[in-house]
Image (cartoon, rainbow, N blue to C red):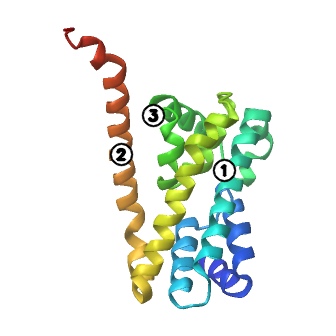
Amino acid sequence: MEQQVLAWIGQYGYAAIFVLLVFGIVGLPVPDETLLTFTGYMVFKGRLALPLAFAAALAGSISGITISFTLGRVFGLALVHRYGRYLRITEAHISKAHAWFERVGRWGLTIGYFVPGVRHLTAYAAGMSELEPRHFAVYAYPGGFLWVATFIGLGYFLGERWEAVEKHVDRYLLGGSIAFGVAIAGYLAWRKWGRHSEPGP
């Protein structure tokens, strides 16, 4: 699948980047990070223009996560029961994502991009929680921007070494995302309880 995805990008360029990211974030088995890193490499080689490649990737990621959010908001678990097997999504997956979303809060939409297998599930869970679309956009879309910029930048600056490094990047991102999530949770806890414990003047 990975080699086919890279071949499609080489053949169809920006359209393939957009369409594949939409499908990947909705839940189909598309190697999103590999796709983006390879896109950066294609920019490095001069095969793609950076502004257009970035725009196609960002539009695809935002469209995909918005579709997941909308499906969760409109259909909830009914869609998972009927079509979840085609997207490799089960009710247990959604329950775990929902619990994670409730624990981390809306920041889960931002950092969720960097956790493999979580992006579309977090958006679906956010839709089921009836989060307002404008609040969803405020947290999810900047996360998409950072995610796209990180991996396209990685492919561009690594150049010919992109494939060797990309194979190991997921585990570092997972650890970093967990650390970031813990930091965000600690900050929110401090805001909620720490300020009230401070002595007054």
Read off the residue under disc 2: 180
Q: CA distance from mark 3 to mark 2?
A: 10 Å
Read off the residue under disc 3: 104
**Does 41 sit left or right of 74 as displayed?**
left
Say which residue appears at 72% left-offset and 37% top-offset. Answer: 72
Q: Earlier in the sequence, mark 1 or mark 2?
A: 1
Residue 200 percent coordinates (x, y): 21, 8
SS of the residue under disc 2: helix
Rendered image quadrant of residue 74: top right
In the depicted structure, whether residue 127 falls above or below residue 195: below
Read off the residue under disc 1: 65
Rendered image quadrant of residue 63: bottom right
Residue 53 percent coordinates (x, y): 63, 75
Q: Amino acid at mark 2?
A: Phe
In the depicted structure, whether residue 82 falls above or below residue 12: above
Residue 96 percent coordinates (x, y): 53, 36
